[in-house]
Amino acid sequence: MKVGILGGGQLARMLALAGYPLGLKFVVLDPDPNAGAGPISEHLLGAYDDPQLLAQLAEKADVVTYEFENVPAQVAQFLASHTTVYPPANALAVAQDRLLEKNFFRELGIGTAPFAPIASLADLQNAIAEIGYPAILKSRRMGYDGKGQVVLKSADDLAAAWRAMQDAPAIVEGFVDFNREVSIIAARRPSGDIAFYPLSENRHRGGILRVASACSADPLQAQAENQVRRLLEALNYVGVIALELFDIDGELLANEFAPRVHNSGHWSIEGSETSQFENHLRAILDEPLGSTRNRGQAAMVNFIGGLPETSQLLNLPNVHLHLYDKAPRKGRKVAHATVRCDQAESFRDTLETLENLAKRTDDS
Ligand code: AMP
């Protein structure tokens, strides 16, 4: 079987690495000649919307998936008319637009921060009168890792924040004073079987994920599973999904979902019986899903913009290094390291060391 992936970055690379033991082959479409998945897959080099390359991708692959959600609707439609594409195009359409996404959560009875659509400065002033400060203005489309977002602290911020949107449709959200951020990753097969991962507790800085830790028997696990199940079933979803949530005193509010494998699940490579990457492949190939049980304690640290000496990381006990083969650039995720171990003290010490090393080389 051959799996086609739109995008050839680190997520495609880790999908391919998970697929080789299952005898799978991969073909990726990516405009970057140095794409991280290139050396371990057949690489179609060119634009994501090049009709000839898309036709080749569809023809070569038994099933096509993607590693980012901003796939143009016509590309998803074209692929779906030629081959099987998972996750389904409607999941992409919802995840690409923060307003559709928040409305969808609301329809499903999944709580969110208060929000309102914004198309003008007057809309923003009216909405803020209801929502109050602090709040966040976010572009509806093409936002990730905190991009296209402005925090609003007082009336003085409104005009400049709206100008920064450059007339792009936006939403404003109340700023959530959360206790912690968590995400739940789940995989669903076409038959409807679902596997849920233990919650991940996530720490962000500047809107970018820095550290993700596997939770064990978290009291909010059932609440999160219930929310992601509703989402998966309403979308008739196939593949891995990640739902990002704010925990406010035990109540979970949804922030957003990603219709793909997710950075907050990278610890599953070593920390779970079956990684999110393998389960995504199993799901889209309609094979039985693997166990999502934890294997000891696990946490992942991102390296952004730069990397310490590799030997410094490899010298740490119980650490697993994943280099993405990407040239360092400001704010770019170039690698992650996972610490997995059963011994609480050693786990904590190693995680702290990893975080300090990451901070030293982090340029974002
Ligand atoms: P997003 O691009 O929506 O995932 O936002 C990136 C990060 O910004 C989140 O993980 C939070 O740390 C923070 N953030 C986003 N929206 C809110 C909100 N309404 N209240 C508080 N923090 C937020």
Image (spheres, rainbow, N blue to C red):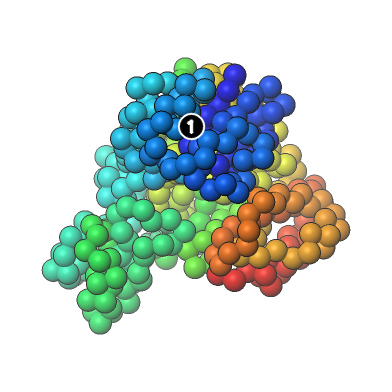
Q: Is residue 270 left or right of residue 233?
A: right
Question: Which residue is tagged 1?
Answer: 65
Give percent across and percent down for residue 205: 53, 67
* Residue 194 in the image: above or below residue 356: above
| Residue 241 makes an appearance in the image | no
Q: Is residue 41 left or right of residue 123?
A: right
In the displayed image of the protein, which residue is found farthest to the bottom? 156
Q: Residue at x 26, y 77 (%)?
A: 160
* Residue 230 in the image: above or below residue 126: above
Give percent across and percent down for residue 364: 55, 69
Give percent across and percent down for residue 347: 77, 56
Give percent across and percent down for residue 123: 15, 64
Q: Is residue 159 left or right of residue 252?
A: left
Q: Residues within 10 Å of mark 1 (few under 14, many from 20)?
A: many
Q: Residue at x 67, y 70 (%)?
A: 361
Which kind of residue does numbered mark 1 sit on? Thr
